[in-house]
Image (cartoon, rainbow, N blue to C red):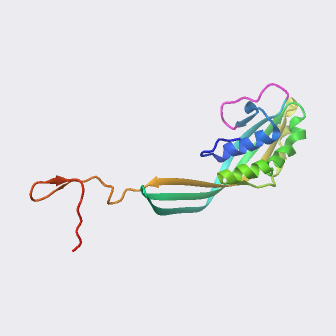
Amino acid sequence: MLPVKDVRPIDYLRDVIRYNLNLQEDRVNIYNQKFSIPNDQYLFIGIEYKMSKVYASKSEFEDTTDGFIEKQGLNTQEHYAILIFSRNTDALLRKEEVVQALGSIYAQQQGSAYGFSIARIAPIQDLSNIEGAAILYRFEISVVMLCRYEKIIPISWYGTFPFQVTEANGITTTTPVITEP
C-alpha cells in the first residue's frame, strides 16, 4: 500500500500490479530506471509512460485564515505501456492477471484515495517474436488512466507586501493606518 501523500500515477500503477500479482519490489520497475531484465526464468514487469492529454485546467482563489491561496487543478488522460517478460511461461500464463489487477477492488480503492482511474479494458499485444531464438515471452498491455493533479500556492496581496511609511513628523512605521474619507 502506498503512503498517504502525493502519489504519481506511475507509482500508483506499479503498486496496483505488485499488490495484485503478489510480486517482490524488484520484479515491477518503472521503464528506463537503469535496470536489466533478470536472468532468471520468472515474471518481470516494466511500466512505461507514453503520453498524456490535458482535458481540463482550473485556477481559483480562496480567502483562508492564513491569507489568500490559489488552488490549481489539472485533469489528464495518460497512456502507459505495461511490459511483461519471462523466460518461462509465466508471462504467457499471467498476462491476463495484469488486466484483472487494473479493475480490482484494491485499484479502485487506491484510485479513489489518490484521484486516479484506470480503464478496465486493455489490449494485450504479443511481442515475443522480437527476441527471435531467445524465446523470451514478451507482452505489452496498453493502459489509459484519468488523473487529477492539484497544487495550492499562497498569494501575496497588498496586506502582505513589506513596506515602510515615514510620516511628515519623522515617525516611521510598518503598520499602515488607513482612514476612510
- x, y percentage for residue 131? 83, 34
Q: Residue furthest bottom?
A: 181
Task: Identify which residue is drawn at 47% across, 58% down.
Answer: 70
- x, y percentage for residue 181? 21, 74
Q: Is residue 32 magenta?
A: yes
Question: Residue 28's quadrant in the figure?
Answer: top right
In this rendered view, identify the residue nearer to me: 171 or 17.
171
* In the image: residue 148, left or right of residue 163: right
Most common secondary structure along the magenta stretch: loop
Magenta-drawn segment: 30-41
Q: Residue furthest left?
A: 169
Which quadrant holds the N terminus?
A: top right
**Up-down relation of residue 134 to residue 174 (above or below):** above
Q: Is residue 14 magenta?
A: no
Q: Is residue 143 visible?
A: no
Question: Residue 160's quadrant in the figure?
Answer: bottom left
* In the image: residue 161, left or right of residue 4: left
- x, y percentage for residue 51? 66, 51
Task: Identify which residue is drawn at 75% across, 49% down.
Answer: 107
In this rendered view, identify the residue nearer to me: 6 or 145.
6
* In the image: residue 84, left or right of residue 166: right
**Up-down relation of residue 33 to residue 105 (above or below):** above
Q: Residue furthest top?
A: 39
Task: Identify which residue is drawn at 80% across, 54% down.
Answer: 120
Q: Is residue 144 visible?
A: yes
Q: Number of labelled discs?
A: 0
Task: Identify which residue is drawn at 67% across, 44% down.
Answer: 10
- x, y percentage for residue 78? 67, 53
